[in-house]
């Protein structure tokens, strides 16, 4: 069953840290079956407050999504995202 991780950037804290994250995160996908479905595209807000940005990535399973997210390579790079902005990250299974 496909599984998605949805990242919403709520507010920027340190653009330099985000730039470091952006420059390195692509490397963490190597060897993982991931498809980027959306990355900071134009938004049309239908309800609630607008996030600064949205990223949606697809994996073939929850196990595959967790394997990437929990990997040492991603967790090392994610520290820059944590310092750079307030995000929400949600893993959701498809139907």
Image (tube, rainbow, N blue to C red):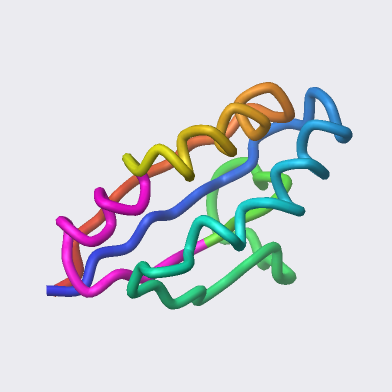
Location of residue 49 (image quadrant): top right
Residue 94: x and y in percent read 19, 69
Q: Looking at the picture, tell me which residue is in the foreground, 43 or 77.
A: 77
**39 is within the stretch colored magenta:** no
Residue 10: x and y in percent read 65, 35
Mark count: 0
Image vertical order of residue 95 relative to residue 55, above or below: below
Residue 13: x and y in percent read 79, 23
**Magenta segment range?**
56-69
Instruction: Name the residue: 67% across, 31% down.
Output: 80
**63 is within the stretch colored magenta:** yes
Residue 18: x and y in percent read 77, 39
Question: In the drawing, does residue 84 fall left or right of residue 5?
Answer: right
Instruction: Name the residue: 40% across, 38% down.
Output: 72
Question: In the drawing, does residue 68 fall left or right of residue 49?
Answer: left
Image vertical order of residue 18 relative to residue 42, above or below: above
Q: Given the current orientation, which residue lies at the most extreme right position?
A: 16
Image vertical order of residue 44 relative to residue 35, above or below: above
Q: Looking at the picture, tell me which residue is in the foreground, 9 or 36.
A: 36
Instruction: Name the residue: 53% across, 52% down.
Output: 47
Image vertical order of residue 94 relative to residue 65, above or below: below
Question: In the drawing, does residue 65 fall left or right of residue 14?
Answer: left
Quadrant in which the C terminus appears: bottom left
Quadrant in which the N terminus appears: bottom left
Question: In the drawing, does residue 65 fall left or right of residue 29?
Answer: left
Location of residue 64 (image quadrant): bottom left
Q: Looking at the picture, tell me which residue is in the foreground, 4 or 63.
A: 63
Q: Looking at the picture, tell me which residue is in the foreground, 18 or 29.
A: 29
Instruction: Name the residue: 74% across, 70% down.
Output: 42
């Amino acid at each position: 069953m496909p599984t998605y991780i949805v990242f919403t950037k709520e507010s920027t804290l340190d653009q330099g840290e985000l730039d470091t994250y952006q420059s390195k995160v692509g490397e963490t996908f190597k060897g993982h079956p991931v498809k980027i479905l959306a990355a900071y595209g134009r938004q049309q807000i239908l309800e609630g407050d607008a996030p600064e940005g949205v990223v949606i990535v697809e994996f073939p399973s929850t196990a595959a999504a967790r394997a990437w997210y929990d990997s040492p390579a991603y967790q090392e790079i994610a520290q820059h995202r944590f310092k750079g902005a307030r995000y929400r990250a949600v893993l959701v299974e498809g139907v």
